[in-house]
């Protein structure tokens, strides 16, 4: 054994020596054969190009040395050594759209530091590129050129066949010179939202163009002529113009004869086209994908859709269609994707269902008829759609029960029947849908029991949504979620939404086996239990929404936890007790523990624990002590409700001018002192409730700076002095409720109050006010 071992080592060592020397000679050999692998003039040009670019992450750091053909992103022709391809696409696509950040997740530090921003190239594109006379492929997509123009000289890169500048933040007009790129096959300028073009006439010379994507570019200035210009491209097989015509009532030109006979993919979605469907559309008989969703086309559904014999993908959602749902769909036997969602079909559905039987061998994978005002039962003919993976019938008026055959849709991944008028029990056959990921059944009137059998094979289920009707006294809950105490579910849910159903005792037990939960909405299910720390700890790292409101949860909350992703907690209307927990989350924006039995004071460092809170509602508890300053210093706070507790002390005399507070309710507490004039900095304040406290002094004049006020309730306090004249002036023009009852206000009721045009409720009772002789004129006002 030993000898053999040593022999092997020696053997490998020898092999290694041989191999390295062989590689050396091969390298020498190849460099001598291909002496000038990279053409020096082109190498120089690339270095100048690099010099003018901004490259924070050093993506082009390999651009050194002689052989430019080996540089990152560069390819040369292996016979002529000319640079033919430059692919500098940013390998890290942006996580969010640069121009349209999701308002819930605004651009923040994290994003700015993201891989996308770091590895974006920017700066100037030097005309030295013109030395690359054989460049036929140029991709600068996903970089960041800061609204600079696309260089005019690109039009001189005569060999270009592929030009991709999408998502690169170019701006200004598309240079007409691009019309000189007569070899171009692929042109993708999409998602440069500052780019525009007033005429597409420059396209007319690009007769070998196969792929054109101008999505997101402002083409409103082209009027109706764009159709004419695009029709000059007889080789076009893919045309994408979504989000290009954003002017109300954009018309579509009619055409005498159509050139686009090779067109396979047409995307005109998200425009504002207003007209009947243009008739030339129906001559594009080779189409396999047609997306004209989100437009204002009008008129009935044209029967010419039957011309599209090869159509696989048809998206007509939000297209402005009305009237009968077309049976013609049944002639499109190749369809894989069909969406008619968000149109106003009010009839013809039976015909539509029947038309499926024209295609017994259909391969429809996705059917979306959501929000179409459909009134019918689910018909047996639906059973012919054997390949369905996604069925969305949400938001209609469908009635009757779920047919048993649904359990035979063995490929189904998504089933959404929510917000209809369906009844009956949920068939056990749904438990056979082993591919199901998402099951939405909320907003119907189901009956009967849900048991283990309903889930027996749902191993992939991630998203389960069910809502029940709150019934009458005899049958308080129409649907019962009834599984055994020791049930082990076959799935790991990411989202669970069950509202107003009756869940049996086993429910809360098996839910704790779900360790991948991200969103939990279990409002009003009569759950009577405690919220265990181990479970919260287990899901705390990924949890985003937690709503357990309106149940009978009791006991204490775990006192110290961290939630790195949490946005929303609602545990209101339960019987939870003990202290307000120390939960740390920089992401949370809503924290609602109202209507419970919490006692003690608000943690003084709450502003540190939840620095980005927008809503803090702790109303109807047994909380006491003073309201800690850190509550008043929360910069993002919009809603603060501490009503009906035993808070004491005074309102703060210093408030941040940055405060965005809209809703402030500290009524029904033991607060004392005066109304601080600092409240005047709350310029966004709409509702102010300080009622039923021991607050004295006068109404400070600074309050007139709260010009958004709509409702003021200062009733049942010890306030005195006159009712300030500004209340009836133009300072608080939106005021609709003014409640000052049970105080010590004195003096005349000013006629100025009649100027409050929106006033609906005025209560000045139980004060020392004298009523003048005039009559209140405002009709809607309730005067006491
Ligand atoms: C040149 O490269 C292409 C693509 O990489 C390859 O198909 C071709 O065989 C190569 N030609 C020579 C002569 O090496
Ligand atoms: C291109 O680079 C050359 C050499 O660095 C420079 O002189 C010229 O001004 C640059 N042109 C542009 C348009 O940046
Ligand atoms: C252009 O680049 C974008 C982003 O890198 C990519 O998604 C798109 O498919 C490319 N377009 C073409 C025609 O290849
Ligand atoms: C297109 O090329 C021709 C000839 O090279 C040139 O005269 C013309 O100015 C170019 N057009 C544009 C718009 O750059
Ligand atoms: C788009 O361009 C038209 C005219 O070219 C202009 O009137 C309109 O304001 C532009 N729209 C946007 C959103 O920039
Ligand atoms: C069809 O395309 C050809 C080639 O671009 C062009 O000459 C012809 O005018 C086009 N026809 C129409 C009706 O636009
Ligand atoms: C569409 O096709 C019909 C019949 O084939 C023909 O009469 C009509 O002229 C065509 N329309 C266009 C715009 O090409
Ligand atoms: C459906 O497919 C079967 C077998 O693949 C075939 O025999 C039958 O003719 C097809 N029917 C239609 C209407 O295409
Ligand atoms: C479901 O499929 C099975 C086997 O293909 C069949 O026997 C049964 O009749 C089908 N059920 C319904 C309700 O269509
Ligand atoms: C719901 O369906 C029932 C019949 O099952 C019908 O009487 C009722 O009008 C429907 N409700 C709505 C809102 O369509
Ligand atoms: C569950 O699905 C598997 C495969 O998809 C199948 O073999 C099995 O019979 C199914 N079990 C039940 C109880 O339907
Ligand atoms: C539902 O379950 C309850 C007990 O949990 C039982 O009394 C009732 O009969 C069941 N109803 C149906 C329709 O199975």
Image: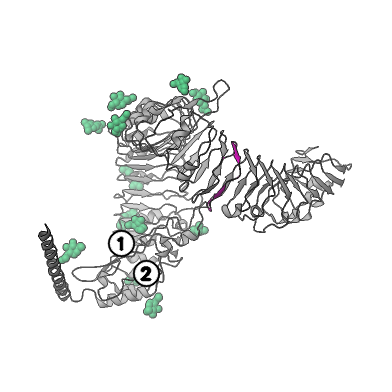
Residue 231 sits in quarter = bottom left
Front position in the image: 445 or 373: 445
Name the residue: 29% across, 42% down.
310
Element type at mark 2: loop
In reply to whether residue 573 is colored magenta, the answer given is: yes
Element type at mark 1: strand
Looking at the rendering, the stretch of residues picked out in magenta corresponds to: 571-587
Q: Quadrant of the N terminus?
A: bottom left
> Taking the image as four quarters, which one is ligand 3 found in?
bottom left
Residue 333 sits in quarter = top left
Instruction: Tell me, yes or no, if residue 358 can be seen here.
Output: no
Tell me: 372 left or right of 634.
Answer: left
Name the residue: 72% across, 43% down.
669
Eye-nearest disc, 1 or 2: 2
Tell me: 359 left or right of 171.
Answer: left
Whether the residue under disc 1 has CB within 8 Å of ligand 3: yes
Q: Which residue is mark 1?
A: 162
Task: Look at the picture and state if 516 lies above or below 105.
Answer: above
Q: Which residue is mark 2?
A: 58
């Amino acid at each position: 054994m030993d000898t053999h071992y040593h022999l092997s080592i020696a053997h490998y060592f020898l092999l290694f020596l041989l191999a390295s020397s062989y590689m050396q000679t091969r390298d020498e050999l190849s460099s001598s054969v291909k002496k000038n692998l990279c053409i020096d003039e082109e190498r120089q040009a690339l270095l100048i190009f690099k010099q003018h670019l901004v490259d924070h992450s050093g993506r082009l750091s390999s651009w050194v040395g002689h052989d430019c053909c080996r540089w990152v992103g560069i390819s040369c022709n292996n016979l002529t050594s000319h640079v033919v391809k430059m692919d500098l696409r940013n390998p890290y696509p942006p996580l969010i759209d640069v121009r349209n950040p999701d308002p819930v997740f605004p651009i923040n530090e994290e994003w700015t530091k993201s891989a996308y921003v770091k590895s974006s190239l920017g700066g100037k594109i030097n005309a030295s590129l013109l030395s690359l006379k054989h460049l036929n492929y140029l991709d600068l997509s996903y970089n960041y050129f800061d609204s600079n123009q696309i260089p005019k000289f690109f039009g001189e890169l005569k060999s270009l066949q592929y030009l991709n500048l999408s998502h690169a933040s170019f701006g200004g007009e598309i240079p007409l010179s691009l019309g000189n790129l007569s070899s171009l096959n692929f042109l993708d300028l999409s998602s440069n939202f500052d780019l525009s073009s007033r005429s597409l006439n420059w396209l007319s010379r690009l007769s070998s163009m196969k792929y054109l994507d101008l999505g997101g570019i402002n083409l409103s200035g082209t009027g109706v002529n764009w159709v004419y210009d695009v029709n000059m491209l007889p080789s076009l097989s893919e045309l994408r113009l979504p989000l290009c015509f954003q002017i109300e009532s954009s018309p579509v030109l009619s055409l005498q004869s159509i050139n686009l006979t090779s067109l396979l993919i047409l995307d005109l979605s998200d425009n504002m086209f207003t007209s009947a469907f243009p008739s030339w559309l129906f001559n594009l008989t080779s189409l396999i994908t047609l997306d004209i969703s989100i437009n204002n086309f009008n008129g009935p559904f044209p029967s010419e859709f039957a011309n599209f014999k090869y159509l696989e993908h048809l998206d007509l959602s939000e297209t402005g269609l009305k009237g009968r749902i077309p049976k013609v769909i049944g002639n499109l036997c190749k369809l894989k994707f069909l969406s008619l969602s968000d149109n106003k079909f009010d009839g013809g559905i039976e015909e539509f269902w029947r038309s499926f039987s024209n295609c017994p061998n259909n391969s429809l994978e996705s059917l979306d008829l959501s929000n179409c005002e459909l009134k019918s039962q689910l018909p047996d003919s639906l059973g012919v759609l054997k390949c369905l993976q996604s069925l969305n019938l949400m938001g209609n008026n469908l009635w009757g029960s779920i047919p048993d055959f649904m359990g035979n849709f063995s490929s189904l991944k998504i089933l959404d029947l929510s917000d209809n008028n369906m009844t009956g029990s949920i068939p056990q056959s749904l438990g056979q849908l082993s591919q199901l990921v998402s099951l939405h059944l909320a907003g119907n009137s189901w009956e009967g029991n849900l048991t283990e059998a309903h889930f027996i094979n749902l191993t992939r289920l991630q998203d389960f949504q069910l809502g029940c009707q709150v019934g009458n006294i005899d049958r308080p809950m129409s649907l019962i979620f009834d599984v055994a105490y020791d049930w082990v579910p076959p799935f790991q849910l990411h989202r669970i939404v069950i509202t107003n159903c009756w869940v049996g005792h086993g429910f809360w037990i098996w839910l704790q086996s779900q360790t991948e939960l991200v969103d939990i909405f279990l409002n009003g299910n009569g759950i009577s239990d405690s919220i265990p720390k181990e479970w919260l700890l287990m899901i705390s790292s990924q949890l985003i929404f937690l709503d357990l409101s309106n149940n009978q949860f009791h006991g204490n909350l775990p006192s110290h936890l961290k939630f790195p992703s949490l946005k929303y907690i609602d545990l209101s209307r339960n019987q939870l007790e003990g202290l307000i927990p120390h939960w740390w989350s920089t992401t949370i924006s809503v924290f609602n523990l109202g209507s419970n039995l919490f006692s003690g004071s608000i943690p003084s460092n709450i502003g540190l624990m939840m620095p980005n809170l927008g809503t803090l509602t702790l109303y109807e508890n047994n909380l006491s002590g003073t309201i800690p300053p850190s509550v008043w210093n929360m910069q993002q706070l919009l809603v603060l409700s501490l009503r009906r507790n035993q808070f004491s002390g005074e309102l703060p005399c210093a408030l941040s001018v940055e405060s965005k507070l809209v809703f402030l309710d500290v009524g029904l507490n033991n607060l004392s002192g005066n109304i601080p004039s600092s409240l005047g900095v709350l310029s966004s304040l709409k509702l102010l409730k300080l009622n039923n406290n021991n607050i004295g002094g006068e109404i400070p004049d600074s309050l007139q700076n709260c010009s958004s006020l709509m409702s003021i309730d200062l009733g049942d306090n010890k306030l005195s002095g006159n009712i300030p004249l500004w209340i009836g002036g133009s300072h608080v023009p939106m005021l609709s409720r003014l409640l000052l009852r049970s105080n010590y206000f004195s003096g005349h009721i000013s006629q100025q109050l009649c100027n409050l045009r929106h006033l609906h409720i005025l209560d000045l009772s139980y004060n020392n006010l004298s009523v003048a002789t005039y009559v209140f004129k405002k009709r809607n006002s309730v005067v006491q």
